[in-house]
Image (cartoon, rainbow, N blue to C red):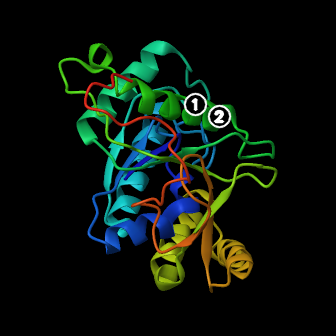
């Protein structure tokens, strides 16, 4: 599974799902587009030092989650949603070759509607499609296997929801939350535990993380991938299919 995010700490909202995939023995790669260098959490530090600290935080969170971590060099608060950047991510997808992609979705509420979050989600969703096109990802091979998209769910979303039962991973989820709460003041474990419990009540489990299911069935599952397909055929699967 590829987890495409804008800033280190975005993964707090998907920590249990990452752990659930790893518990299956699946590879999980977290890609952050920026280093989150515009934060003021460290006081008046130079941007380069802030970026260094934030990158270290992200890698440390990846170790807690037992996931691979990659940082790109796009500017915090100014991620460009353009063809060049989407092509760059498509080439990365053609290298990682995921069976599912988790990223930011459309959002309306404060925090989730951060311009970087919105641009990040559009870029990764575009890149999943572009990764299927040989001329875009050359010299890599195109990645044409299904890679259903899931997005972090906003309270006003009308996309069918999918939930992951993350009850077995409470300790590690809260460890990631505490890691960021100590470092930058975000991710209060009590807040996160309450949020997961509330979602769990909606799905009849102890703790749950909820996402938008763009290309797969709604319901509660032990992991996002493999994803149960939507009823019916969305697109023909044939050996000569180009897109």
Is 57 rendered above or below residue 5? below
- Could you tell me how far apart the alpha carbons at marks 1 and 2 are, in whole angstroms? 6 Å
Is 159 rendered above or below residue 169? above
- The answer to whether 143 appears left or right of 202 in the picture is left
Q: Residue at x 56, y 20 (%)?
A: 81
Quadrant the C terminus occupies? top left
- The answer to whether 119 appears left or right of 18 in the picture is right
Task: Give the structural element (helix, strand or loop) at label 1.
Answer: helix
Q: How many other residues sit within 10 Å of disc 1, few (<14), some (14-19) or many (≥20)?
A: some
Q: Residue at x 80, y 42 (%)?
A: 108
Task: Give the structural element (helix, strand or loop) at label 2.
Answer: helix
* Residue 203 image point, x, y percent: 68, 77
- 37, 68: nearer the viewer: 68
* Residue 51 image point, x, y percent: 45, 39
- 192, 179: nearer the viewer: 192
- 24, 182: nearer the viewer: 24
Residue 193 location, quadrant:
bottom right
**Number of on-image labels:** 2
- The answer to whether 216 appears left or right of 218 in the picture is left
Q: Residue at x 47, y 62 (%)?
A: 224
- Cβ–Cβ below 8 Å for labels 1 and 2? yes
Q: Which residue is mark 2?
A: 118
- The answer to whether 192 appears left or right of 236 in the picture is right
* Residue 17 image point, x, y percent: 48, 66
* Residue 232 image point, x, y percent: 54, 48
Q: Nearer the viewer, mark 1 or mark 2?
A: 1
For residue 122, which numbered disc appears in the image? 1
Q: How many other residues sit within 10 Å of disc 2, few (<14), some (14-19) or many (≥20)?
A: many
- 149, 36: nearer the viewer: 149
Q: Residue at x 71, y 72 (%)?
A: 195
């Amino acid at each position: 599974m590829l987890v495409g995010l804008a800033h280190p700490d975005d993964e707090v909202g998907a920590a249990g799902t990452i752990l659930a995939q790893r518990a299956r023995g699946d590879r999980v790669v977290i890609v952050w587009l920026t280093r989150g260098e515009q934060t003021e959490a460290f006081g008046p530090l130079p941007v380069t030092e802030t970026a260094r600290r934030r990158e270290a935080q992200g890698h440390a969170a990846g170790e807690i989650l037992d996931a691979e971590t990659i940082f790109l060099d796009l500017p915090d608060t100014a991620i460009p949603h353009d063809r060049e950047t989407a092509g760059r991510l498509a080439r990365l997808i053609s290298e990682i070759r995921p069976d599912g992609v988790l990223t930011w979705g459309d959002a309306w509420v404060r925090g989730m509607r951060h311009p970087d979050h919105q641009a990040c989600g559009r870029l990764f969703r575009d890149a999943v499609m572009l990764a299927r096109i040989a001329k875009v990802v050359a010299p890599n091979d195109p990645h044409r296997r299904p890679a259903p998209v899931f997005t972090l769910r906003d309270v006003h979303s009308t996309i069918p929801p999918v939930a992951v039962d993350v009850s077995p991973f409470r300790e590690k989820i809260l460890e990631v939350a505490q890691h960021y709460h100590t470092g930058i003041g975000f991710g209060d474990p009590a807040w996160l535990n309450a949020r997961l419990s509330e979602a769990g009540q909606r799905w009849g489990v102890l703790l749950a993380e909820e996402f938008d299911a763009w290309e797969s069935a709604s319901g509660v599952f032990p992991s996002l991938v493999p994803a149960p397909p939507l009823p019916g055929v969305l697109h023909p699967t044939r050996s000569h299919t180009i897109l």
